[in-house]
Image: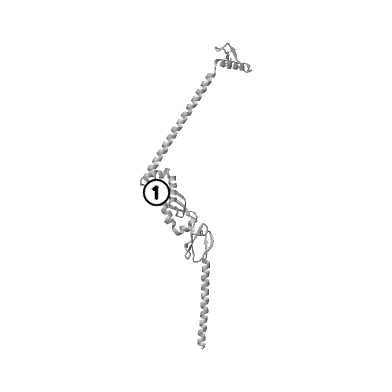
């Protein structure tokens, strides 16, 4: 009897132990689930919720903003960097006449935050490699193929840069990626082509300088001609306004002023052929 009682006591003790262990394990699991319900979204980030038991990616509600959020532990949150980002591409492309050109570009972009859930659902977290880079490469090849090496190297770089942006932006339409800027950082041509272009540009600059000097000389000659015409017209006007009577009157005025001067020592003798007196300086 005592042996059977001991067995029963052992069974009761074991059951209590199992219950206690189950409670501890259950409490620990609940604690872990409780902690996993908190999701932290950092600065410049946004989160997309995936509900395995509720329709998959949540495309109805807006993405999770910065801060701490409580999410059901069976749901998963995918965090995206929504700041402006940069990728650098070095591409070999063909010009209009089939020459190899190496183009270095910088692309500024960021995810379209308003469609972040659609980006995650239809393009995935690898959207830069899957969507953005192919679009940049395709647009760059299409645009550069319209120009000659000389245009790419010198006069058309700004236009090419804008066209690459426009073409890439067109390709990225409905791809849930926001394109901000495309910069052409460097253009590398074959050495022989580069040297030929530089020689041609130098000759063009020399021709422009020579043309400038010719224009300058022409303008200077025109200025001198106008100045000479002005002097000629002035002399003509003055000559027509001077008469014998005016000259005689001016001579009389000068004689009177000399006669009234106390320091003047002059001798007036006779008269000239124009009727004016002849004034002599006795010291001479």
Quarter of the view holding residue 266: top right
Question: Is 212 situated above or below 245?
Answer: below
Q: Which residue is mark 1?
A: 142
Q: Residues within 10 Å of mark 1 (few under 14, many from 20)?
A: some
The furthest residue to the top: 270
Question: Can residue 124 be seen in the rendering of this structure?
Answer: no
List the single residue furthest toward the left: 98
Residue 124 position within the rendered picture, expressed as x and y whole percent measured from the top left: 44, 59
In this rendering, the answer to whether 102 lies above or below 19 is above
Pick out the residue farthest to the bottom: 1
Q: Residue at x 42, y 56 (%)?
A: 130
Q: Is residue 256 visible?
A: yes
- Please provide percent x and percent y for residue 136: 42, 52
Up-down relation of residue 122 to residue 155 (above or below): below
Closer-to-camera residue (130/58): 58
Q: Is residue 185 left or right of residue 249?
A: left
Indicate left or right for 59 with 282 as reference. left
Of residues 106 and 121, the one drawn nearer to the viewer in this rendering: 121
Q: Quadrant of the C terminus?
A: top right
Identify the residue at horizontal 39%, vertical 49% (top origin): 142
Residue drawn at the location 49% of the way across and 27% of the way down: 226
Q: Nearer the viewer, residue 172 or 160?
A: 172
Q: Kindly state the secondary structure of the residue where label 1 is placed.
A: helix
Q: How is the image coloured?
A: one colour
Picture coordinates of residue 67, whole percent (x, y): 54, 60
89 relative to 208, above or below = below
């Amino acid at each position: 009897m005592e042996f059977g009682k001991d067995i029963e006591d052992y069974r009761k003790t074991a059951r209590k132990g199992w219950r206690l262990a189950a409670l501890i394990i259950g409490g620990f699991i609940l604690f872990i689930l409780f902690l996993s319900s908190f999701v932290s979204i950092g600065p410049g980030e946004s989160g997309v919720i995936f509900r395995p038991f509720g329709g998959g990616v949540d495309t109805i509600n807006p993405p999770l903003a910065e801060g701490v959020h409580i999410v059901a532990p069976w749901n998963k949150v995918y965090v995206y960097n929504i700041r402006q980002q940069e990728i650098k591409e070095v591409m070999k492309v063909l010009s209009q006449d089939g020459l190899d050109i190496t183009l270095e570009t910088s692309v500024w972009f960021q995810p379209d935050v308003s469609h972040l859930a659609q980006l995650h659902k239809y393009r995935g977290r690898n959207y830069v490699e899957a969507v953005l880079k192919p679009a940049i490469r395709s647009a760059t090849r299409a645009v550069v193929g319209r120009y000659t090496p000389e245009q790419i190297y010198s006069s058309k770089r700004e236009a090419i840069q804008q066209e690459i942006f426009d073409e890439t932006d067109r390709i990225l339409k409905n791809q849930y990626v926001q394109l901000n800027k495309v910069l052409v950082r460097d253009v590398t041509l074959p050495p022989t082509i580069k040297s030929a272009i530089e020689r041609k540009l130098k000759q063009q600059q020399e021709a422009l300088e020579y043309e400038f000097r010719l224009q300058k000389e022409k303008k200077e000659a025109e200025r001198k001609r106008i100045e000479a015409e002005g002097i000629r017209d002035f002399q003509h006007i003055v000559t027509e306004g001077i008469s014998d009577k005016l000259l005689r009157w001016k001579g009389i005025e000068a004689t009177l002023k000399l006669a009234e001067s106390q320091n003047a020592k002059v001798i007036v003798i006779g008269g000239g052929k124009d009727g004016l007196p002849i004034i002599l300086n006795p010291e001479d």
